[in-house]
Structure formats: structure tokens, C-alpha cells
Image: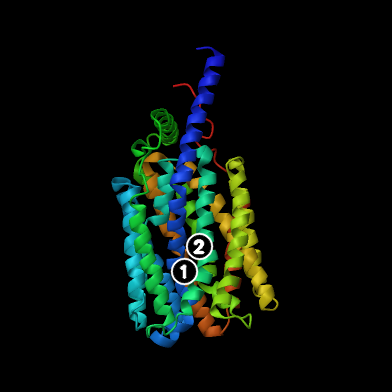
Amino acid sequence: MSETGHLHRAIDHQQLISSAVGKFFRRIIPMLAVMLIINQIDRSNIGFIKAELHTDAGISAAAFGLGAGLFFIGYALFEVPSNMMMKRYGARIWLTRIMVTWGMVVVFTGFVTSPTQFYVLRFLLGVAEAGFFPGVLFYFRQWVPNSHRGRATAFILSASAGAFLFSGPITGAILLMHDFMGIAGWKWVMFLEGGGSVLVGLIALGVLVSRPQEARWLSAQEKEALAWQLAQEDRERENSTAGQSKMALLTDRRLLTYCLIFFTMTMTGYTLVFWLPQIIQRIQGFSSFGIGLLTAIPWLCAIVALNVVGRYSDRYRDKLSQGLGLAMLVAACGTFMATLGNPWFGFVAMIVACIGSKVSATLFWPMPQGELPASIVAPGIALINSIGNLGGFFAPTVFGYLELTTGSTTGGLYALTSVSVITGLCLLLRRNKTTPGAMISMEK
């Protein structure tokens, strides 16, 4: 075949891939975005009812921090098995199962009357939700080539951050239903938000398509082109690790490094989720709904920032480590600034911290998605997420203990700042790996 023929063939191939991925973005991404928004609302809504839990169920600041963190223990224990089950049953069945069961646990949380019950249900929420976010990332590996994955990840993380645009106002408005039908406002939060998860999970069953071959809305040529591209990228990753056992790959230094990086990222991320409402409550003169609206502003700023960064992450894949390091330093500046000045200055500091935290995630996830070999991508991503998410147990627990013993959140914010600074500086000195499949020869 002539050089011109090869060029036209390559162009046609890329057009088919772009068309197929575009259809996936239009038909599937919106459903995943809604699921992730609800996921974050259900995971973080306890941050808005901390005072009510203390009054009605006797849950102190330390008990609240422990309960918030126990979620991540259940999550970590069942993360890898859950992702392996998704690989077996497909996204349509498994992501739906996860969403329905976590919604049921949230509803049951509306009946807690003691710290012990709170601990058990938070642990069970982690068990039920285990595998959801890494399952979405693995889902991308089955649909989206490397050249489009950064943008896909940015969309999903936008939905995750977007949850906080809705969670504050929605949860604040539901709290105003206090004593409606004789039921406390915080119970209405659990009943309505958990019930909504069950309903949306059932709707997702009819929307999600596990693999390109099962999509009726793709043409035969689009299916073939997309399948070939994804298989080619998998082969390149496998060839780069030929001769290594799966156990050796799972103990690879690169994988363990990703686990450590994500651990430090989640320490900041989930402390912001659980304590941001409390920090903003220092600003006087706002109702629960007003506090909810203020809480949404930092996440709105984060969405704008991560979408700007997401546009460039696919183009500059060799600079991801340095970008991630800078983003973590921005998050560190925000948490440090929150210890200074008046409540409004602290609010501005939280905007900076939220931007750094969410941009970090946008830059982080394309790295393991593109570098891990196909044979371990499902358990590998799940392992990163599960071990990393233990930071979500460690940070809120320590934060709650420090607040109880010192009467202030300042010590916890100093600790978070130190961790983010150290990790950010290490990342600035790290060399990026060349992502397999970034440049694919079009000859078969």
C-alpha cells in the first residue's frame, strides 16, 4: 500500500474512533456523572448533620471523625474483590448493584440512635460502595483510548466536584424540613438522598452498556476500529511487562508509589469534604441553606479549574507528575491559609484548597490508567484507590481527635499542609513514564 493510502487509512481509523468515543461521551458519560454526583452527596452528607448527630445520637467530634473514617476501612477491604467482580459481570450489572445497595445503607443511617450504630452503618456504606469509582475508571479502559482518557477523567471528576454544588443547597434545604411529619431534618436527609440513589441505580440498569461490542448505537466499523485500538494499547502495555508474574506486578514500585501519592491526596480531599461545612459555619448570619450555598462556591471554582487543566492533560502527558506536584502545593497553600485571618479569609483559603485537591485528581488518574499493564489494570486501579482511600480514614479520625483535644481545627490543617508539601515536592522531582499507546502505528 502506498504512503498516501496508509495516511488515508489512518485518518479514517481515527475518525471512526473519535465518532465512537463521542457517542460514548454523549450517551454514557451523563449517566455516570449523575451517579457520581449522588455518590458524593451520599458519602459526604454527614458533614452537614454533625451537630444534629451529636444532639440526637450522642456522637461527639471524635466519634464523628471515627465514624466518617470507618467508611474507608470497609471500602478498602472490599475494593479489589469488587473490581474483579465488575470485570466478570460488566459495568451495567455491577455499577448498578453498587448504587442500589449503598442507597439502602444511607436510608438505614436515618435510624441511628447511638455511636455504635453509626460506626456499623458507615462501615457497611464503605462495603456497599467499594469498587464504584475504580470501576468507572476500569470502564473507561474498556471504552476510551489513551488519547481521549484525560478528557473523560476530567468530565467524571467534574461531576464529583459538581456534587458539592448540589449537596450543600440540597442538604441544607432538606434540613429545613425538620419536624415535618414529626421527623427530624437530618433523618429526612438520609431518607430522601438514600432513596434517590436506589431509584437512579435502577434507571442506570437500562442506560449503561458494558462493552463496545454490546452497543447498538455504534456501527460495525466503529466497533471494529475502537476494539482494535484498545487491543493494541493493551498489547503494548503487556509487552512492556512480559515475563513478570501478576504478583510481581502488584508489588511493583510504580504501583506502590501511586498508592502512596493517592493516600496523601485523599487526606486533604476528605478532610475538606467532612469539615468544610463546619469551617464555613464560622461565618455568622447564615441559615443551614445559606451555609449550603456558600459550601458550593469552592467546588464550583474547582470544576472550572479542573476542566481547564483536563484539556491539556492529554496533550502534555509527559508533564503530569510536575503538574500534579504543583497542584498539591496549591492545595497545601489553601489548607495553610485557612489557619490565618478571619472566617471570610478562611473561606477564600478553602477555595484555593478545593482547586488544588480536585486538579490533583484530574492529573493523577490518567497516569496509572495509561501505564498499568492490561493484566492488572482492574485490580491495580482498585488497589490504588483502596489503599489510597485509607487516607480518608486516617485524616478525618486524626482531625476529629485534634479538634476534640485542642478545641480547634488548626492543628489538623497544619498536618495536612505538611503532607501535601512533602508529596508535591517529591512529584516535582519525579520523571514521567512514557505512556504506552500514546502514539499508535496504524499498520496491522
* Residue at screen point 40% across, 41% down: 142
Q: Looking at the image, is mark 2 or mark 1 nearer the viewer?
A: 2
Above or below, 219 against 288 in this view is: above
Instruction: Assess disc 2: are there few (<14), some (14-19) or many (≥20) residues with their C-alpha within 10 Å of its C-alpha.
Output: many
Q: Toward the viewer: 403 or 146? A: 146
- Residue at x-position 59% and y-position 53%: 306
**Label 2 amino acid?**
Ala
At x 50%, y 68%, the residue is: 167
Is residue 242 at all visible to an observer of this figure?
Answer: yes
Q: Position of residue 28 (x, y in %)?
A: 43, 47
Residue tagged by mark 1?
A: 44
Residue occupied by mark 2: 163
Closer to the camera in the image, 416 or 369 = 369
Q: Is residue 55 left or right of residue 288?
A: left
Residue 340, x across and y down, in percent: 68, 75
In the rendered picture of this protein, how many numbered marks are placed on residues? 2
In percent of width and height, residue 13 lies at: 49, 27
Q: Is residue 252 left or right of residue 284?
A: left
Say if residue 74 shows up in the picture: no
Q: CA distance from mark 2 to mark 1?
A: 10 Å
Q: Is residue 420 placed above or below 214 in the rendered structure? A: below
Asked whether disc 2 touches disc 1, contact meaning CB atoms under 8 Å apart, the reply is yes
